[in-house]
Image (cartoon, rainbow, N blue to C red):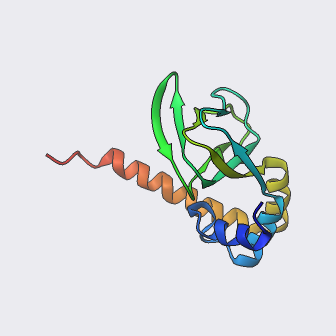
């Protein structure tokens, strides 16, 4: 079990929370639950309504849809972050590719925290907007020969 201070330091190292001040991260750490998954265990099922996101402390996960691997994520990466912002079905499934330790943040707790600390919402929006711009740039850039 990691301490609150360790959670804050970990959160600061995760891209999604990197722009959020440490004192606000302490509040995020307070609502984050440490959770573990066994190798091969299904963590998120495509099509389910999501209500939480996960931040990988240790291990790796595979993001997949209809049996096709979309990506592999590891330490300090997040998944399920779209579900914490909307109430739409999960766009892909996620399974543990090894034994995995994560911090789990529930939508309800996160919404409450964002309503009290708008800096957290702004930090998340900045990072997600940056990701979207990067994805759009990759689509518009022609492949190199």
Residue 30 higher or lower than 39, as above or below: below
In this rendering, the count of numbered labels is 0
User: Residue 43 appears in which quarter of the rendering?
Assistant: top right
Q: Is residue 85 visible?
A: no
Front residue of this view, candidates 54 and 37: 37
Residue 54 higher or lower than 23, as above or below: above
Q: As drawn, which residue projects farthest toward the left?
A: 145
Q: Quadrant of the N terminus?
A: bottom right
Q: Residue at x 59, y 63 (%)?
A: 14
Residue 107 located left or right of residue 45: right
Front residue of this view, candidates 74 and 127: 74
Q: Residue at x 68, y 41 (%)?
A: 37
Q: Residue at x 83, y 64 (%)?
A: 30
Q: Residue 2's spot in the image, x, y percent?
A: 75, 64
Q: Residue 83's spot in the image, x, y percent?
A: 69, 42
Q: Residue 79's spot in the image, x, y percent?
A: 61, 46
Q: Is residue 141 visible?
A: yes
Residue 36 higher or lower than 9, as above or below: above
Q: Residue at x 86, y 57 (%)?
A: 112
Residue 110 located left or right of residue 134: right
User: Residue 94 appears in which quarter of the rendering?
Assistant: top right
Residue 75 located left or right of residue 25: left
């Amino acid at each position: 079990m990691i301490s609150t201070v360790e959670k804050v330091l970990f959160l600061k190292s995760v891209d999604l929370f990197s722009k959020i001040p440490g004192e606000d991260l302490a509040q995020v750490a307070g609502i984050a639950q440490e959770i573990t998954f066994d190798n091969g265990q299904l963590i998120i099922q495509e099509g389910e309504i999501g209500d939480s996101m996960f931040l990988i402390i240790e291990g790796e996960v595979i993001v997949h849809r209809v049996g096709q691997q979309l990506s592999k994520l590891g330490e300090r990466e997040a998944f399920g972050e779209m579900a914490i912002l909307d109430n739409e079905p999960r766009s892909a499934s996620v399974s543990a590719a090894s034994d995995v330790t994560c911090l789990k943040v529930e939508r309800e707790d996160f919404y409450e925290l964002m309503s009290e600390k708008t800096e957290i919402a702004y930090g998340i929006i900045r990072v997600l907007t940056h990701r979207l711009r990067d994805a759009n740039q990759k689509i518009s850039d022609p492949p190199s020969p």
